[in-house]
């Protein structure tokens, strides 16, 4: 009798153990399915991004037309020679020392002004987005387009001409050579498609000054024409804090002849930071809609694995402090005129120190 009782108890224990194992197996299967589903969703979005080989996509062209010419006479030859000597000395000094840190990821955001498939355009905006995992900061550093520098194996000219000559690859080489900062990857977007992103987040809240209104509205006519709207559609009628739609935000970002390129880069960083802030408040479905609009308009040299890591880590990065920065820094530059171009003659040593301090915290 006792043997039968023991046998029943053993069977009961085995039955409980079996149920626990089955339950555990079900949980594991559900978890695996969840992970597979999440990965599949992420790669569904990643597949929307154009992954490109910048060397093949942007072969070097023989010449670039100098643009935005001024009526002012060129600076004296000795001033131009002095500026180019500084450039040469900087290129020769510590030529192989590029700032880097395994806990800092530098991604160059390139906004281009191309009008069509056959128009490469120039890098209208160059913002180095640095994610510093040590300091828990995201640093947005604008490089002003008019910086006078040397494009490797090409010429002394404006920084943004490097993109026109050889696309993202040459632009990165130019920045690394002149400013000694490693750039890991890039993301490229046409400014005219940028409008759709701003509209998708519900616009951006900008304090528009009275002086900015005529410049903003002048830019709207070209943007409206390219986007298929009437010339006077969505003109800004008053100053003060207001929500700008995509076309208005783009025109605002491109205002140049008020405060020169310094104020322009500040406007671009302000709009970008505003978009990031708006993204934090979006629901999952709204974020999904935003990705559907944004990702097909991006091009990058990131691998799928790198993009996957960025997507997975993005909730952490969104909690980081956002810091705005600009090169050249205050007090480290002067205007000179070269070949009828107004360009920025910079102190490279001071600006390299500025980058090292702000991006790497050193």
Image (cartoon, helix red, strand yellow):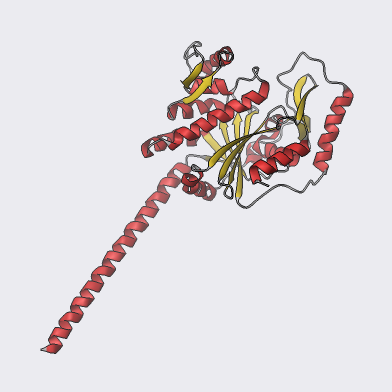
**Left or right of 101, for residue 198:** left
**Residue at far right of view:** 78
Q: Residue visible at 82% across and 44% down?
A: 93
**Left or right of 41, for residue 247:** right
Q: Residue visible at 65% across and 37% down?
A: 168
- Can residue 118 be seen in this snapshot? no
Figure quadrant of residue 357 = top right
Q: How many marks?
A: 0
Figure quadrant of residue 212 = top right
Q: Nearer the viewer, residue 227 or 277?
A: 277
Q: Position of residue 41 (x, y in %)?
A: 40, 46
Q: Residue visible at 64% across and 27% down?
A: 121
Q: Position of residue 53 (x, y in %)?
A: 61, 42
Q: Position of residue 259 (x, y in %)?
A: 66, 20
Q: Is residue 50 above or below residue 119?
A: below
Figure quadrant of residue 299 = top right
**Residue at far left of view:** 1
Q: Nearer the viewer, residue 69 or 264?
A: 264
Q: Is residue 111 above or below residue 52?
A: above
Q: Position of residue 149 (x, y in %)?
A: 77, 33
Quadrant where the N terminus sits is: bottom left
Q: Is residue 266 above or below residue 38?
A: above
- Can residue 95 be seen in this snapshot? yes
């Amino acid at each position: 009798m006792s043997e039968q009782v023991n046998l029943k108890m053993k069977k009961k224990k085995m039955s409980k153990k079996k149920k626990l194992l089955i339950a555990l197996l079900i949980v594991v299967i559900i978890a695996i399915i969840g992970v597979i589903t999440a990965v599949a969703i992420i790669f569904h979005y990643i597949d929307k991004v154009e992954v490109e080989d910048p060397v093949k996509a942007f072969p070097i062209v023989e010449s670039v037309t100098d643009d935005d010419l001024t009526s002012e006479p060129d600076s004296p030859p000795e001033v131009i020679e002095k500026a180019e000597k500084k450039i040469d000395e900087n290129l020769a000094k510590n030529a192989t020392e590029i700032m880097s840190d395994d806990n800092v990821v530098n991604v160059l955001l390139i906004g281009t002004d191309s009008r069509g498939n056959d128009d490469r355009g120039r890098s209208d905006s160059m913002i180095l987005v640095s994610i510093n995992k040590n300091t828990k900061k995201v640093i947005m550093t604008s490089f002003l387009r008019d910086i006078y520098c040397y494009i490797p194996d090409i010429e002394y000219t404006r920084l943004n001409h490097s993109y026109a000559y050889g696309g993202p690859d040459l632009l990165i080489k130019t920045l690394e050579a002149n400013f000694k900062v490693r750039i890991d990857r890039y993301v490229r977007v046409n400014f005219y498609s940028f409008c759709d992103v701003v509209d998708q987040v519900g616009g951006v809240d900008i304090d528009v000054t009275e002086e900015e209104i005529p410049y903003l509205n002048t830019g709207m006519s070209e943007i409206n024409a390219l986007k298929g709207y009437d010339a006077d559609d969505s003109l800004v009628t008053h100053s003060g804090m207001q929500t700008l739609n995509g076309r208005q935000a783009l025109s605002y970002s491109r205002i140049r002849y008020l405060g020169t390129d310094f104020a322009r880069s500040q406007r671009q960083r302000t709009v970008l930071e505003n978009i990031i802030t708006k993204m934090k408040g979006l629901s999952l479905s709204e974020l999904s809609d935003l990705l559907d609009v944004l990702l097909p308009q991006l091009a990058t040299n990131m691998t799928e694995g790198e993009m996957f890591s960025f997507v997975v880590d993005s909730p952490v990065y969104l909690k980081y402090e956002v810091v705005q920065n600009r090169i050249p820094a205050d007090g480290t530059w002067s205007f000179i005129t070269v070949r009828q171009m107004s360009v920025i003659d910079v102190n490279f040593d001071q600006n390299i120190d500025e980058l090292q301090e702000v991006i790497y915290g050193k």
